[in-house]
Image: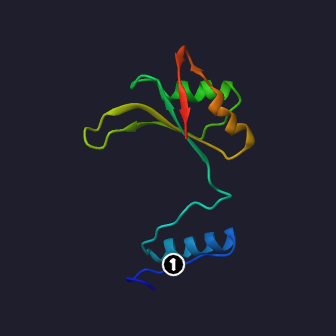
Amino acid sequence: MNNDKLNIFPPTPEAHKAIQNKIIQDGMKSRTYELNDEKQIKVVIRGLSKDFDTSEIISHLQNQGFAPTLCHPIRNRQSNTNFNLFLVTLPKITKSKEIYQIEFIGRMRVTIES
């Protein structure tokens, strides 16, 4: 225990979930990290306009065989405006790694980055 903080490293994903459920039940503050088997691939799409519709990005990726779970514009915290960047979250499967090969969304040339 260090500075009123307790670090717990559960041996299995099931133990991790049981501990998390108990912490939530008791209303305690906690911070967790994603488990390796639950991590998703997060990529940034660069090259689209600020007001590009996220549903169009999702449908375009789905048409190419991807299964995005989330897509939203990245916002500037200070001015509360969108950047020309979109965060896309994909499940951690081999097909998702092919997203880096996409060059166009719609008629716009894009760059996919980690």
Of residues 65 and 84, the one drawn nearer to the viewer in this rendering: 84
Residue on which disc 1 sits:
7
Q: Is residue 57 above or below residue 77?
A: above
- Is residue 114 shown left or right of residue 5? right
Find residue 7 and report its horizontal and vertical position in percent: 51, 78
- In the image, what residue occupies the spot 55% across and 78% down? 8
Find residue 96 and report its horizontal and vertical position in percent: 68, 38
Q: Is residue 23 above or below residue 2?
A: above
Q: Is residue 7 above or below residue 55?
A: below
Give the residue at the far bottom of this rendering: 1
- In the image, what residue occupies the spot 51% across and 75% down? 23
Give the residue at the far left of this rendering: 79
Find residue 2 and report its horizontal and vertical position in percent: 42, 83
Find residue 72 and report its horizontal and vertical position in percent: 47, 36
Q: Is residue 8 above or below residue 36?
A: below
Type of amino acid under label 1: Asn
- In the image, what residue occupies the spot 62% across and 69% down? 17
